[in-house]
Image: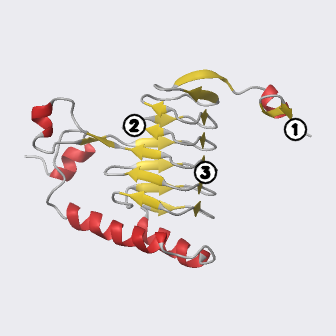
Amino acid sequence: MLTIREKMKKGMLYTDMGEGLVEERMRCKELVYDYNLTRPSEETKRHEILKQLLGSVGKEPWIETPVHLAYGSNTHIGDHFYANFNLVVVDDIDVHIGNNVMFAPNVTISATGHPVDPELRKTAAQFSIPVRIEDGVWIGAGVIILPGVTIGANSVIGAGSVVTKDVPANVVAVGNPCRVLREISERDKEYYYKDLKVE
């Protein structure tokens, strides 16, 4: 018979009680609480808490408060990561975020979901599928990223999008559900927003 953690890693249904999972979530909540109560000037203290909280953390991270995570230890961020206010990461399984990634306010990443069938939900059954955000991605305000999604390098996800499936590299994708709008092009080097030109 598989353990809860083995079921989690295989994307199977499980309940998240036992095997030390409750204690891990409590540890995360305590560290998140400490992080969210730091003063803006306590940059060194914030970095130290992030090292304890996250599975791995690259150089020069900046995560605005408040932030909320389920485990923390399953979230891995690369170099020069920036997250604006109200980042939520439901990281019951791995969430990998690459280098030079930027998040606008109110981004939610949920690597975990629940089955649609109400009888299955009565047992508090859930599933977890890893999320991957590759290098150079910009996630707009209010974006929700669902279990199992990979967002390719350098892509931009428009504000308010709900990302239900993979997004390729080097595109602008928007909407609910999120769809590719266009490829990133040479015009984007000349115009940074609508008809506003880089001087």
Residue 71 sits above or below residue 108 on the image? below
Residue 59 coordinates in the image, percent (x, y):
61, 64
Residue 62 coordinates in the image, percent (x, y):
60, 62
Mark 3: amino acid: Asn
Q: Report the Cα–Cα distance between label 3 and label 2.
A: 21 Å
Which residue in the rendered view is the most extreme toward the left?
1
Single out the mark in the foreground, 3 or 2. Answer: 2
Q: Which residue is mark 1?
A: 198
Residue 100 coordinates in the image, percent (x, y):
64, 50
Residue 180 sits above or below residue 146 on the image? above
Mark 1: amino acid: Val
Label 3: element kind? loop
Q: Are marks 1 and 3 in contact (CB under 8 Å)?
A: no
Q: Which residue is mark 2?
A: 146
Q: Which mark is residue 99?
A: 3
Quadrant of the rendered image containing residue 199: top right
Pointer 1 or 3: first along the chain = 3
Left or right: 42, with 113 as reference point: right
Residue 102 sits above or below residue 32 on the image? above
Q: Which mark is residue 177?
A: none
Q: Nearer the viewer, residue 60 or 140?
A: 140
Pointer 3 or 2: first along the chain = 3
Left or right: 47, with 116 as reference point: right
Q: Residues within 10 Å of mark 1 (few under 14, many from 20)?
A: few
Label 2: element kind? loop
Residue 89 sits above or below residue 172 on the image? below
Task: Name the residue located 27 percent from the left edge and 65 percent from the top edge.
Answer: 24
